[in-house]
Structures are given as structure tokens and as C-alpha cells.
């Protein structure tokens, strides 16, 4: 429990024992929200305004403050003083430091980990790229948010299933095969990979404007895939392999993995029972030849299930996928990390599942996020204004290398560090704001070693490692925790003590950016500490305590970065 929650709980106990019969006293949680940090440090580390208790107790706030302070029995946590209706707390800094340091040393790199998720399963649908399309910067957020959430849930003890719900179904693949048969060659596609496939697709549309009969040919090829025609399937699965090989390069660079690649086509033979079920439950109605689930009661447009030609669509596959995932993994939650533009789609799908009578429908969550623009320019496929993710990452690594060459020319394995820093800079930018906010990516901002950036946090981690490498002697003495009672050490310890709560909150809100914020705050607080205090010098007990604090910062930053998918080099 962090310090503020602890104090709030103690105040709550104190009030309850003073006034056992009072009605409407606020709970500890509300009290915590009321605790404030006084603007003047002379008034204590925290202050509790007693006004909130005036009404339920029918007492004047100054009297309440006096009564609470008189009854306070935990000088080991904080000493207290009533001032003008406030209960002011002066932390017992040495005890606080000793407690949190003991916990850090006991838990080591598992500080912040938990078993609250034991026995529970979370499915995460993320990245979910489309076949025959290059991995572009628009897919960065889903990939990194999903990857980070998976690590966070793993750290909290959940069983997680990472699913790449591939976009590997649709009429466009018929068109692509048609174009390939007409104008493509095996060598060209092997060489050009996904770019060659995209070029074929563009060519198809150009030619089809002149000759609309091509559209029919494209549809026929798609029908062949659906009917399991050998040639069509062979070409299609080759396209798929090419795309996945391309994507694997990006996933490798980012360190991202999946447990399943079951995409849209995986559900080809799993939709019929779902459609039958919808029919049996009287949920399907016909509308202009198509079959839909009416959602007018929910003020949503109908959810299209079968087109008039009998073809299934994206939503049909998502219904089948949700049922399959529940039956296969028995998830406690299924998260869909997908751009906010698909908000209506997911509201419709979840509502249909609910109407089918599945109580677990409420455990399906659309984890939406905003758009990424690049150096102020929106990305649009139509204008050809797409930033390919592998190009972006490669550039990031090159730029990081140039900075490292300048800053630390003597560094060993510069290439490896540049890779960690360049990619860290991109990932940090992506996970630094509330996910629903749009992001503008800029090189200057992402790679600024002094700003709130990935490289800055990584650099702080490397700084801790460097101090620790020089600290062999200091590790011999017994730490004197009262050496950690200065303002800078206490600020740092408070941030660290909140870290486990931050991880849980990030999981509850599906918001990795809270961890990004926390590691950044800790890095800043450490650097302040580092400039104000000499860590290795001084009397042995003090030096040992300061070195232990440095080691705690190192460990917490490393964990935090890991949870948002960023590596932590030991030298930079
Ligand atoms: N492939 C889709 C896209 O790129 C995202 C799929 C998301 N997952 C899902 N189950 N619908 O837009």
C-alpha cells in the first residue's frame, strides 16, 4: 500500500474508533482523495482537511482535527499536528525509508509483481495486420499497446493469450490473384514482397476502371479461394507467407510475440453454427436481401451478418472468433486493441453476443486508441503518404547511433545499444500519452536525451548501473536508512512506493502510459537526487543506504521499461 492510502486507512480507523455511531463517515478511499500535499513544507508532508467530516459529526473542523490528532497512535508512521481544521502529517521518514527499502530488497526484480491474476485468463487481440499490406506506422499503437498490456497482465499473474487476428479474408484477395495471373510473375513478387502485391492491387484498380469486367474475374477468383480451389489457395497462402515474413522482421525488432495467428480465415468453418444460433434465437431479420441483427433498440444501425449474396463479413467473423475464444480459452476478459474508428463495430458485435445470451459478452472490451501522425502530417494510404514501420525503426536506430557516436564514442557494442535506444524512442513516444489521444511523432522530440523520452529514461538506468559498478566497497556495510530522510530521497521513495499501484491501475484502465509516466517521474527524481547528493562518498552506513536506493531505482526503471516493451541498456 502506498503511503497516502496507508495514512487514509489509519485516519479512517481513528475516526471510526472515536465516533463508532457516526453515520456517513467517508470511506478510506474517499479520504485518500482528500489528502493533500501542503504548499508549505512547514505544514507537513500531507494534510487532511477535516471539513468533510463536519456534517456527519456535526462538529467544527478545528475540533475534529484536535480530536483526531489526540487519538492518533501511530508515531511510527507519522507525527501529527492540528492546524485550522487540518490534520497535518509529518512522515516518520526513517521508518518509511526502512520499510520500503526492506520490501524492495525482499522482492528484488519482482517488486510490483502480484498473483491477483492467478487462475484468470485474458485474451488480447492486437496488431492484427492485414495480408498483402505493409506494416505501417498506423499499426504501431495496436502492436505496442497490446504487447505492453500482455506483459503487464503476465506480471500480475494472469494467464494471457496474445492473438494476431490476421486480416486474411475478403474479395480484395481475389482481385490480387487475378492481377497476379494477368500481369505478375513469381520472381517479381518474391523479390518485391508485399510492395509487389500492393502494386498489383493498385494496377488492378486502374485497369478495372477501363474494363469493369475485371471486377467479375476478381470475384470469381475469390469464390475459388472460398471453394478451396487448389491453385487459388496455393497463391493465396503464398501471399500470406510473404506478408508474415515481412511482419516478422518488424516483430523481431520490437520484441513482440503472439500465441496465436488465428485470423479471419480461421473462422471460415466456424461461422455456420453461429449463424444458425442467431437464426434459432430469432435474432436474424432480413433487410434488403441481407441478413442482419436489428439493434434499433440500442440506437445502433443493424449488425450485418450475411450479405445478400450469402457472403459473411468482418462482424460475422468477429462473432465466431469471440465464441471460439470463450470456448477455447475460457477467458475472463477479451481485449480488442483496435483504433477508435472501429468503435461502432465492436459495440455492435458485443451487443449481439449479449443478445445471444452470453453473459461473458460484458467481458469483451474494445481498448481504443487515437491516430498517429508523422511530423505533423496525417497518414493516408490514398495519398500514398504512408510511413512504413520497418523504415521508421531502421531510421530510428541510425539516428540513435549517430547520437551515441557523438556522446559516447568509446562505448562497446554501439550497434546493439543504438538498436535498443532507437526502438525505445519510438515505443516510448507511442506509449507516452493516454491511448485515446492522437500522437504526432517527431524525431527531435523522440530522440531528445534530455526531455521526457525513452532515451532519457534509459540513460538514467545506465547511470544507476554505472554508479553500482563502482560501488563494490559500499555494499559491505550495513545500510543506515536514516541517511535517506532528505527531501530528494523521500520524493524518490514515495514515487517508488506507488509503483505497484501504478501497475495495477495501468492494468485496470488498459493504460500502459501510466507506467511510462511513472518511470519518467522516477528517472527525474533520481537525477535530482544524483545532483544533490554524493552517493558513493561519506560514512559507510550512509553510502550503503544510498547505493541500495540507486539499485532500487535501477530495478524499478528496468521493470517499468520492460512492461512497456522497452529494453534497458546498462551502458550508454
Ligand atoms: N485487421 C483489422 C485492421 O487492421 C483489425 C482487426 C482487429 N481485430 C478484430 N478482432 N476485429 O483494421
Image (spheres, grey):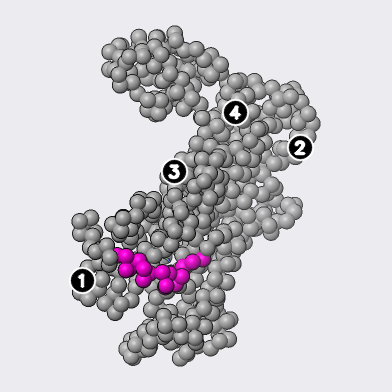
Q: Residues within 10 Å of mark 4 (few under 14, many from 20)?
A: some
Q: Earlier in the sequence, mark 3 or mark 4?
A: 4
Report the span colored magenta: 261-278
The residue carrying pointer 3 sits among few (fewer than 14), some (14 to 19) or many (20 or more) residues within 10 Å by Cα, namely few
Choose mark 2 or mark 4, whichever is in front.
Answer: 4
Residue 534 location (% of width, % of height): 69, 29
Q: Is residue 221 above or below residue 346?
A: below
Of circles 1 and 4, the one toward us is 1
Pointer 2 residue Cβ closer than 8 Å to ligand 1? no
**Lower position in the chain sequence, tag 2 or tag 4:** 4
Vertical order, 460 against 444 (above or below): above
Please name the residue that numbered disc 2 is placed on. 470
Q: Is residue 286 above or below residue 351?
A: below
Residue occupying image coordinates x 75% and y 34%: 471
Q: Quadrant of residue 549?
A: top right
Q: Which residue is most to the front?
A: 280
Query: Going 26% across and 77% down the picture, which residue do you hit?
Result: 308
Res. 538 image quadrant: top right
Between circles 1 and 3, the one closer to the viewer is: 1
In the image, which disc is placed on residue 508?
3
The quadrant in which residue 556 appears is top right
Magenta segment's dominant SS is: helix
Task: Name the residue carrying label 4.
Answer: 100
Q: Say which of 136 and 165 sits in front.
A: 165
Label 1 CA crowd tier, 10 Å (few <14, some 14–19, many 20+): some
Give the CA distance from mark 1 to mark 2: 75 Å
Residue 105 locus on image (x, y percent)? 66, 32
Tell me, yes or no, whether the highlighted magenta stretch contains residue 266. Answer: yes
Residue at 63% x, 48% y is 568
Residue 361, relative to residue 249: is it above or below?
above
Q: Tell me the residue that label 1 is attached to.
A: 287
Is 376 part of what is drawn in magenta?
no
Amino acid at each position: 500500500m502506498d503511503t497516502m492510502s496507508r495514512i487514509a486507512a489509519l485516519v479512517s480507523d481513528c475516526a471510526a474508533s472515536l465516533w463508532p455511531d457516526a453515520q456517513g463517515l467517508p470511506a478510506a478511499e474517499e479520504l485518500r482523495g482528500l489528502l493533500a500535499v501542503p504548499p508549505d513544507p512547514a505544514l507537513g508532508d500531507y494534510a487532511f482537511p477535516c471539513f468533510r467530516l463536519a456534517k456527519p459529526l456535526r462538529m467544527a473542523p478545528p475540533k475534529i482535527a484536535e480530536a483526531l490528532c489526540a487519538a492518533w497512535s501511530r508515531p511510527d508512521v507519522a507525527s501529527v499536528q492540528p492546524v485550522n481544521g487540518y490534520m497535518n502529517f509529518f512522515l516518520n521518514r526513517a521508518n518509511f525509508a526502512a520499510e520500503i527499502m526492506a520490501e524492495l530488497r525482499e522482492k528484488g526484480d519482482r517488486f510490483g509483481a502480484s498473483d491477483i491474476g492467478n487462475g484468470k485468463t485474458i485474451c488480447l487481440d492486437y496488431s492484427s495486420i492485414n495480408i498483402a499490406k505493409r506494416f505501417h506506422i498506423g499499426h504501431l499503437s495496436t502492436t505496442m499497446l497490446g504487447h505492453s498490456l500482455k506483459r503487464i497482465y503476465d506480471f500480475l499473474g494472469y494467464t494471457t493469450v496474445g492473438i494476431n487476428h490476421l486480416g486474411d479474408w475478403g474479395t480484395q484477395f481475389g482481385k490480387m490473384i487475378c492481377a497476379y495471373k494477368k500481369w505478375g510473375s513469381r520472381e517479381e513478387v518474391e523479390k518485391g514482397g508485399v510492395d509487389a502485391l500492393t502494386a498489383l492491387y493498385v494496377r488492378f484498380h486502374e485497369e478495372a476502371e477501363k474494363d469493369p469486367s475485371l471486377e467479375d474475374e476478381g470475384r470469381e477468383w475469390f469464390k475459388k479461394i472460398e471453394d478451396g480451389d487448389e491453385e487459388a489457395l496455393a497463391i493465396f497462402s503464398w501471399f500470406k507467407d510473404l506478408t508474415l515474413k515481412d511482419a516478422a522482421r518488424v516483430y523481431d525488432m520490437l520484441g513482440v510475440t503472439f500465441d496465436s495467428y488465428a485470423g479471419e480465415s480461421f473462422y471460415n468453418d466456424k461461422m455456420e453454427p453461429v449463424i444458425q444460433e442467431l437464426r434459432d434465437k430469432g435474432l436474424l431479420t432480413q433487410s434488403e436481401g441481407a441478413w442482419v441483427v436489428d439493434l434499433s433498440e440500442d440506437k445502433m444501425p443493424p449488425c450485418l451478418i450475411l450479405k445478400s449474396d450469402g457472403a459473411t463479413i468482418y462482424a460475422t467473423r468477429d462473432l465466431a472468433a469471440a465464441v471460439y475464444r470463450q470456448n477455447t480459452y475460457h477467458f475472463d476478459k477479451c481485449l480488442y486493441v483496435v483504433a477508435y474508428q472501429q468503435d461502432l463495430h465492436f459495440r455492435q458485435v458485443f451487443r449481439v453476443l449479449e443478445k445471444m445470451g452470453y453473459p461473458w459478452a460484458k467481458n469483451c472490451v474494445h481498448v481504443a486508441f487515437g491516430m498517429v501522425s508523422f511530423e505533423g502530417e496525417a497518414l493516408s494510404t490514398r495519398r500514398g503518404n504512408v510511413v512504413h514501420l520497418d523504415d521508421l525503426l531502421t531510421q530510428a536506430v541510425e539516428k540513435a547511433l549517430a547520437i551515441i557516436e557523438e556522446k559516447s564514442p568509446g562505448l562497446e557494442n554501439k550497434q546493439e545499444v543504438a538498436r535498443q535506444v532507437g526502438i525505445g524512442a519510438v515505443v516510448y513516444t507511442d506509449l507516452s500519452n493516454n491511448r485515446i489521444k492522437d500522437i504526432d511523432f517527431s524525431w527531435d522530440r523522440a530522440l531528445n536525451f534530455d526531455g521526457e523520452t525513452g532515451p532519457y529514461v534509459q540513460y538514467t538506468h545506465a547511470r544507476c548501473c554505472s554508479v553500482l559498478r563502482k560501488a563494490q566497497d559500499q555494499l559491505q556495510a550495513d545500510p543506515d536508512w536514516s541517511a535517506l530522510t532528505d527531501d530528494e530521497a523521500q520524493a524518490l521513495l514515495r514515487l517508488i512506493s506507488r509503483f505497484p499501484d501504478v501497475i495495477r491501475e495501468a492494468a485496470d484502465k488498459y493504460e500502459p502510459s501510466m507506467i511510462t509516466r511513472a518511470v519518467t517521474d522516477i528517472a527525474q527524481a533520481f537525477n535530482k537526487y544524483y545532483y544533490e547528493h554524493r552517493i558513493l562518498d561519506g560514512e559507510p552506513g550512509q553510502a550503503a543506504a544510498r547505493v541500495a536506493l540507486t539499485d532500487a531505482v535501477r530495478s524499478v526503471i528496468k521493470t517499468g521499461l520492460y512492461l512497456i516493451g522497452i529494453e534497458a541498456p546498462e551502458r550508454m
